[in-house]
Image (spheres, rainbow, N blue to C red):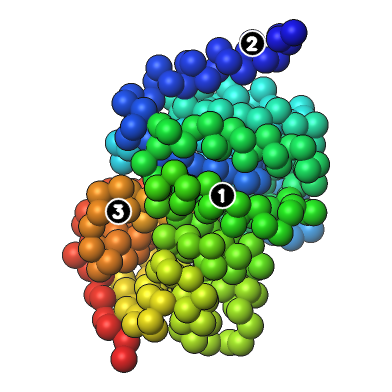
Amino acid sequence: MATTADAESVARAADATARSGPAASRILCLATNPAIDITYTIDELRLGSSHRVPTGLARAGGKGVNVARVLQQQGEPVLVVAPVGGPVRSIFVHDLDRSGIPHRLVDVEAPTRRTTAIVTLASTTNLNERGTALGAEDWASVLEATRAELPGARVVVSSGSLPPETPEGLCAAVVELAADAGLPVVVDVGGDQLRHAVACGATAAKPNRHELLDAMGGSDPLDAARRLAAEGTGTVFASLDVEGMLAVLPDGRAWHARLDRVLDGNPTGAGDAAVAALAQALLEGVTLEEQLVRATAWSAAAVLDPQAGSIAPPQALRDRIRVTPIG
């Protein structure tokens, strides 16, 4: 017998479909560790002191959701798939509905986490909860929800940290689902999950420096990216913070893209913007150089926007990016 929750889920899915435009043009964004993102912008953070602050900006987030927000801002139809539960679930759903982001949420008992960003003129401090472990049945439901939405997708994104005790083959399973459906897939994850996803044939992987070195060992990101790319068939895009971004092919060929100067702003969400750019670029079938330039420009544009999930107009930044082949 269908429950009230089942009926509400079906209604939300129908509403998401109605808002998303042509189903075949969607970019499916799997948010493996969603969150309620809270951002405070203040002049100065004084450790050990009390602060009276303006009302924080709170909205549904986590990497996968932020990727979807950026894509939607750039005019791409999207669909978010995510496990959500606990007392903030209603806030999460309300914000996605208010933002017009279509979604298929998997109800879980584990409470959805919260993240807090404290943005000052000098720096950004992030407090990111790890999240609560999901059961094997929950993850099976997440994969089934993803599988059910693949017929309406053109590109799949699996993005975000993972809660404790997540099965080590989860991201690889997402890649296999996408591959079976003939869809390109972008992954943004760290550790063994990253290696497994690349080995299973991810079209593009976008680790940051820390995730890359954590997965591959060593201290040289270029060497680590080459070793990682050699394990698969896709491209590794390694973001290096203010030093730009690498693009590395399985045969070892590599390129480096960098903006002409470092930007001041909030770097939270810059990696998500890069993933969004790669998803759009794969949808359009553009060249590798264009993929790298677009990812670098969108990442930089995210720094100029105060909250993760939004970017400043990226076009002006594109002309300031230099791409250099690496011997």
Q: Which residue is mark 1?
A: 174
State whether residue 300 appears in this view: yes
Q: Which disc is residue 281 wearing? A: 3
Whole-angstrom CA distance, mark 3 to mark 2, is 36 Å
Q: Which residue is mark 2?
A: 7
Whole-angstrom CA distance, mark 1 to mark 3, is 20 Å
Give the crowd class for mark 2: few <14, some 14-19, many >=20 residues within 10 Å: few
* Residue in the image at 27% along x and 83% along y: 325
- Relative to residue 100, is residue 170 drawn left or right? right
Mark found first going from the N terminus, 1 or 3 = 1
State the SS at label 2: helix
> Residue 149's x, y, as percent?
49, 32
Considering depth in this image, is 66 or 105 the residue closer to the camera? 105
Q: Amino acid at mark 3?
A: Ala
Q: Considering only vertical position in the picture, is 247 above or below 253?
A: above
State the SS at label 3: helix
Considering depth in this image, is 196 or 28 the residue closer to the camera? 196
What quarter of the picture does the N terminus occupy? top right
Give the crowd class for mark 1: few <14, some 14-19, many >=20 residues within 10 Å: many
- Relative to residue 137, is residue 305 drawn left or right? left
* Residue in the image at 60% along x and 65% along y: 196
